[in-house]
């Protein structure tokens, strides 16, 4: 089955070592109240991500009233290359730093699905090294900007299969959803289709984030 072959390839790609990477300079977007920064899953189509990013952003627009929203698609390969997640990690942090400097009152909602969850994990200081399509941390959001991250929304997070989760300063602002049987985030999971069903969680995730902004 093709999707099982893809998962096998993902497992082989996870956790490889790599050199420190840097992202190209990011240009700031409009100064909205909330910037939704989304890291898509491996090979995931869509503007922010067909399975998670797009439906979550749409739900956030409905749930967060009285505030302006913008979105940013993390610029990274989202493929099986050994440096993919690290490139996303560098770009996400670079974007947040650039936006924060240009827009002093802007806050952020970070969204990550599958490999994109690795990108977000690394960016908030939780290493995804050793996870499926993970990488060592190459950049972290500066401590001075941490209060401006209103919510972190993670779906099919590969570090969960290692027994890890988001801890520390971001823990209370993080919603980390792992569907039952999802082999990417559940050690021993065997339901491949569970990893593709997170669109159903978009409304709950948006409700969680709306309560944090």
Image (spheres, grey):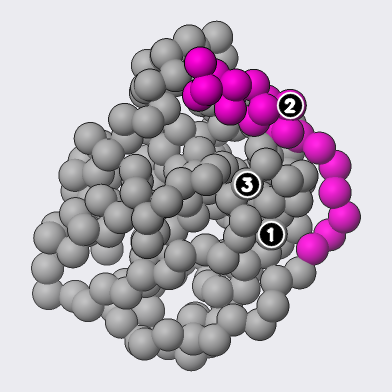
**Which residue is under mark 1?**
87
Mark-to-mark CA distance, 1 and 3? 11 Å
Q: Label 2 belongs to which residue?
A: 12
Assess whether mark 3 and mark 1 are in contact (beta carbons under 8 angstroms): no
Query: Circle 3 sits on which residue?
Result: 79
Magenta stretch bounds: 1-21
Q: Do the residues labelled 1 and 2 touch (CB within 8 Å)?
A: no
Q: Residue visible at 66% across and 37% down?
A: 133
In percent of width and height, residue 77 lies at: 62, 56
Earlier residue among tags 1 and 2: 2
Does residue 86 appear left or right of residue 91 in this picture?
right
Gap in Å between the C-alphas at discs 1 and 2?
Answer: 19 Å
Q: Is residue 90 above or below residue 197?
A: below
**Kind of element beneath mark 3:** loop
The 10 Å Cα crowd at callout 3, few under 14, some 14 to 19, many 20 or more, is some
**x then y, percent, for residue 144:** 57, 72
| Residue 23 falls within the magenta-colored stretch | no
Between label 1 and label 2, give the one nearer the viewer. 2
């Amino acid at each position: 089955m093709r999707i099982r072959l893809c998962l096998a390839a993902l497992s082989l790609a996870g956790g490889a070592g790599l050199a420190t990477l840097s992202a190209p300079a990011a240009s700031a977007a409009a100064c909205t109240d909330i910037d939704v920064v989304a890291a898509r899953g491996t090979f995931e189509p869509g503007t922010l991500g067909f399975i998670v990013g797009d439906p979550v952003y749409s739900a956030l627009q409905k749930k967060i009233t009285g505030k302006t929203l913008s979105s940013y698609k993390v610029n990274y390969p989202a493929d099986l290359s050994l440096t993919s997640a690290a490139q996303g990690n560098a770009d996400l942090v670079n974007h947040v730093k650039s936006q924060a400097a240009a827009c002093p009152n802007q806050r952020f909602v970070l969204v990550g699905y599958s490999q994109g969850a690795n990108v977000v994990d690394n960016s908030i200081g939780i290493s995804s090294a050793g996870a499926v399509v993970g990488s060592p941390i190459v950049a972290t959001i500066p401590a001075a900007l941490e209060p401006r991250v209103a919510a972190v929304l993670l779906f099919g997070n590969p570090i969960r299969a290692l027994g890890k989760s988001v801890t520390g300063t971001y823990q209370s602002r993080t919603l980390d959803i792992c569907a039952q049987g999802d082999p990417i985030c559940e050690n021993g999971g065997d339901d491949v289709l569970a990893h593709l069903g997170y669109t159903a969680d978009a409304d709950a995730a948006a409700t969680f984030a709306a309560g944090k902004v």
